[in-house]
Amino acid sequence: MAKFIYRMQSILDIKYKLEEQAKSVYTEASFRLHEEENKLKILQDRQLMYEEKFRNLILTRIDILKIRECENAIDTIKFSIKMQLIEVKKAEQNLENARKKLSEVMMERKTQEKLREKAFEEFKIEINYEERKEIDELVSFKYNTPVGSEDDV
């Protein structure tokens, strides 16, 4: 029996590799986004802590130096949060780009797989046709060849 050989198997293999690479890039981008969001959360928690400290300093005895230090710390944290928000947006954009690339690569791979399946179906039809042709030839040969000739008697 003939063996099915897909002419474009190397292309399909490349599509599989590209998909794996895109998946790893997507995973890395997702991890990076998660890290940036965690940094933002830490900064926001720190801001809340400084704001609470600032309120306590105002309510208790007035120490101008500590109040100003706390105000400066709050301003610094607010600036850091703004910068971190920019980093989070960049990470989100990178994740979205990686998702689009992954989706595109997966569609290309699926297209190649469908082409392979179609080629395999055509191969099966061709093999089936060849087998029927051989059977028809055998059957017609048997019926056209006399089993026992009367001349031999």
Image: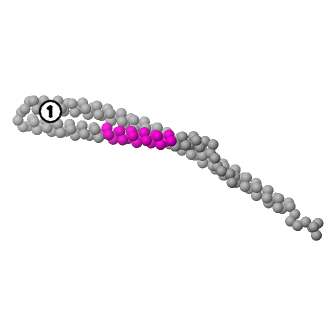
Give the residue displayed 42% in from the left and 39% down from the top.
25
Magenta residues span 17-37
Farthest residue to the left: give it: 61
Residue 52 coordinates in the image, percent (x, y): 15, 39
- Kindly tell me whether residue 111 is visible in this rendering: no
Q: Does 24 lie within the magenta span?
A: yes
Q: Main secondary structure of the magenta part?
A: helix
Q: Is mark 1 on a helix, strand or loop?
A: helix
In the displayed structure, 80 sits above or below 148; it is: above
Q: Nearer the viewer, residue 6 or 101?
A: 6
Farthest residue to the bottom: give it: 153
Q: Quadrant of the C terminus?
A: bottom right
Residue 35 coordinates in the image, percent (x, y): 32, 40
The residue singled out by tag 1 in the image is 70
- Kindly tell me whether residue 62 is visible in this rendering: yes
Q: Does 145 lie within the magenta span?
A: no
Give the residue displayed 17% in from the left and 30% down from the top.
72
Give the amino acid type for the residue marked by disc 1 in the picture.
Cys
Q: In which quarter of the image is the N terminus?
A: bottom right
Give the residue displayed 24% in from the left and 37% down from the top.
43
